[in-house]
Amino acid sequence: MSAPLSRRQLIELIGRAAGSSAAYQIMCTLGLLPITSASAGPPQLPPNSGAGVDVLILGAGIAGMVAALELREAGYHCTILEARSRPGGRNWSLRSGDAVEEIGFKPQRVRWNRDPHMYFNPGPARIPHHHRGILDYCRKLDVPLEVMVNDNRNTYLQDDAAFAGEPQLARRVINDARGFVAELAAKAVNQSLLDEPLSPDDKQQVLHFVRQYGANKDRLLRFLQAFGALDQDFKYRGSERSGYSTPPGAGDQEGTLNDKVDFQQLLAADFWSNPILKMNYSEHYPQQATMLQPVGGMDKIGHAFARRLGSIVRYNAEVTEIRKTGSGVQVVWKDRRRNRTAVMSEASYVICTIPLSVLRNIKTNFSNEIQSAIRAPQYMPAGKLAFQAERRFWELDHQIYGGISWTNRDIGQIWYPSSGFHQRRGILVGGYILGQERGQRFAAKSPERRLKDALDDGERLHKNYAASLREGVAVAWSNIPFSAGGWADWNFGDAAHRQHYQALLKGDGPVFFCGEHMSHLRAWQEGAVQSAFLVIAQLAEHARQSKA
Amino acid sequence: MSAPLSRRQLIELIGRAAGSSAAYQIMCTLGLLPITSASAGPPQLPPNSGAGVDVLILGAGIAGMVAALELREAGYHCTILEARSRPGGRNWSLRSGDAVEEIGFKPQRVRWNRDPHMYFNPGPARIPHHHRGILDYCRKLDVPLEVMVNDNRNTYLQDDAAFAGEPQLARRVINDARGFVAELAAKAVNQSLLDEPLSPDDKQQVLHFVRQYGANKDRLLRFLQAFGALDQDFKYRGSERSGYSTPPGAGDQEGTLNDKVDFQQLLAADFWSNPILKMNYSEHYPQQATMLQPVGGMDKIGHAFARRLGSIVRYNAEVTEIRKTGSGVQVVWKDRRRNRTAVMSEASYVICTIPLSVLRNIKTNFSNEIQSAIRAPQYMPAGKLAFQAERRFWELDHQIYGGISWTNRDIGQIWYPSSGFHQRRGILVGGYILGQERGQRFAAKSPERRLKDALDDGERLHKNYAASLREGVAVAWSNIPFSAGGWADWNFGDAAHRQHYQALLKGDGPVFFCGEHMSHLRAWQEGAVQSAFLVIAQLAEHARQSKA
């Protein structure tokens, strides 16, 4: 866009000749509407530029509330319709007294101790340090943050098929693996260290590596030694990194190193089969330290937005129909509290943050292309469950302060709380269920059954696991009304998916689609924030064109 | 000790015949006194077993206060003589209004904003999750803990001699290194991937690795692929682990990966030259996540101990002489507030937690062996300094939440605070000076000069570093009265050192030596705690023998 003014003038001419919708279509076609959000912050809209423009926002989740906050700031008249009686959407925390309603099951009631750290985030539960959008709102809305321990080397990995099913300490698995890999690399560099004498070909190999890495062999070997804690012969014989069977202490107690884990067993285990989970997890960009969480529960963010927005959020308003008109959009919704149907709202624009899994069951007159797109992605039937622990056995017996243990059982993960250290009780996340198959299996079970099975799975990681746990709560997102799934499981490697996604990105006339499902940050709150930023810019440009 | 009773009876017989001191000497010689603290908790002393026994404890640091608390519980009559007007020793936090006095320099006065997160721990500043002794006291004494971010992949590494002196993002250095090492290892396993065709000898090498690692080659290669984020050809071409130049976002923004760091430069850099610092730091056992800190400052621990101990701590009591007598110990001390000299206290036992660097200048009648031992170890001239930041630029401009950046300049490290996220101001630790040479250079400078130089060094990591920093405070531990150094720098690889350490472990009759310097956990508060546990057991055994 080296000459934006002349292009703009061209579009304005088309707009005058053929109407703003035509101009907008052409802009989309020419790629002149923003479809990326390169800047981490909200678009800077001119003050009062939205005066006289009505926007209906469907959903008071993070995306909808970001859109409302920013558009209101620029003078737009915004109303949010929210089907639930609370803000936040999947941004949700459960505490004593709360109810969990799932389609097909009777409601669960949370019966926990009421201390401030006794909460459970069934939805998002962590904020990476690089998610600037959501972090900026935490700062602006005065939501205090604390560290969420995502990586803890004192947790466990367990696979029924390796190490006789015994849980293995993360620090041993992770650091012994480093050692093994470094030793192997050192063998490649310094083949003279092998048992066999150096052959002419070996010599050439050494030269090859040294050439390739452009450094002298000694320095490369010393690098590998430091990387993997190799001994002076560049062999890995175990290291302090993998911890001690008897720790260093006072007097003569020098400490005794843990034995090396059996590399054959490590190769057999599933600890590494997914490069972004389990033993390699904390190297994965979105999961790297520092990880943050709001003090007292993730829903502190949703509530802070809602407080700031005030009366423009209309709760218990379940959308039943969305109809484009010549001049804007009509939305039919039902007041769930009064069970009054067929309330009609009209606006120039709609920002629809309703998950596609829910939207596909709402009556609309969207284009066929959009209708197909809405039906396209599978939703992840993610699930989570939590228990009240009467005793923080993970701290008292295992010195585990926050972090995650992993198992190949259905629960997948156990999360130890990152707050309330040394308090008497705590909320333990007893499972985070991922994958289509596991998720569907989880959702099909009654909550009681899910909890019982989770206790059995947990027993593989901690002996007498169930003894101090009680009052479990299980959330299967695919059964949760107005969510119907964890997140859009777009497959961007699939050409049809890419096409559907592109269609939704352009919107349908005065209707814009917004939420984590309209981003490459799927399942993250940051995806919702960035999508809102993008849609705001699109809507503002459309409005500017319409006025012109 | 398969027959403890008969040995005990033997010792008692000797005691009756030749006196308790003789019995004690024989016990030491026979190795019957405890000299390790295998259990993480305090020794279980019989209730009231200390009745009628006076113990003088020199120093109200962590070691002294643990000893007093546990011995008092068993009925011992304990008094602590503390030279300072505050408890804690090196367990110390600075806040606005506090003064730092160093020998040879005029006092520094701390002038900071008074918010609860505006503190600086010049001494210990982290508690590893496996330091059970000190953590148990935090629980018992109701000292709230929070996470201390020790490992943050969004910090920087800087070396004047590599990458043109430009700071490198930790996530890139760490994860690209993993990739390089894994690729190298994969070459070793799968030499067919090399440019050169597979020679018969290469084939034998492959067989060798496969034999050695006892797994099929494919699985080993896939393990390396997951470990290092290698591509399908087992080459490292960069990865999401090393982050993005443009992050994934909304709409079409898929994100653009950072380029790989130049491995040649990485080899040239000092990022890995010490295997327990910089890029390999968070793999080092004592530094692994989870790391903890008391909410509001490390000295919350010292003060909690002191509150519990009450009036048995005598402040401003500077010990000037320690004299063994036939029946116990006399200690001469000076009331620093009243400047009254030559107060004499007597007790059956003394637990001396005074750092050896200070003790060597106090008059004693210790044995020659003990006198030599006290003079033996160098003390680490460690230093730290901190500034008040008017603007948390590390969060606002760099999304750094806690953690450490590293440089080869004298400051060594910059610590970003793990509390007060998103507050207006913060305390930035602008240097942690380590090593004999650097430490001595630091201690020799005036505080003003140290601060000025630290700002210059910090500029290498952050442009315009000094602009938002003010009111620095610099602490050179070797100049701090009653500490005279950071910690005992025992060289356990040195035979003379080992001998001196062993001598001190046995004590000198009724005098026991206690503190981090009497442990294999040097510089850690846990070393002080474990040393106290050990000395308590020794003293109790001695007292039991004496009574028998």
Image (cartoon, coloured by chain):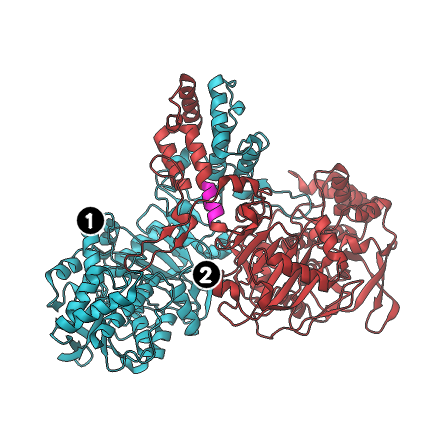
Chain colours: A red, B cyan
Tag 1: Cα neighbours inside 10 Å, few (<14), some, or many (≥20)?
few
Q: Which residues are magenta?
A: A172-178
Which residue corresponds to mark 2?
B418
Q: Which mark is residue B97?
A: none
Q: Is residue A16 above or below residue B59?
A: above
Q: Is residue A24 left or right of residue B4?
A: right
Snapshot quadrant of residue B139: bottom left
**Residue A105 or residue B333, whichever sits in front:** A105
What is the x, y in percent for residue A180?
A: 45, 38
Q: Give amino acid for label 1.
A: Ala
Q: Is residue A159 above or below residue A472?
A: above
Which residue corresponds to mark 1?
B495
What is the x, y in percent for residue A460?
A: 59, 55
Residues tagged 1 and 2 counted as in contact (Cβ below 8 A): no
What is the x, y in percent for residue B419?
A: 46, 64
Mark 1 and mark 2: Cα distance apart in space: 41 Å
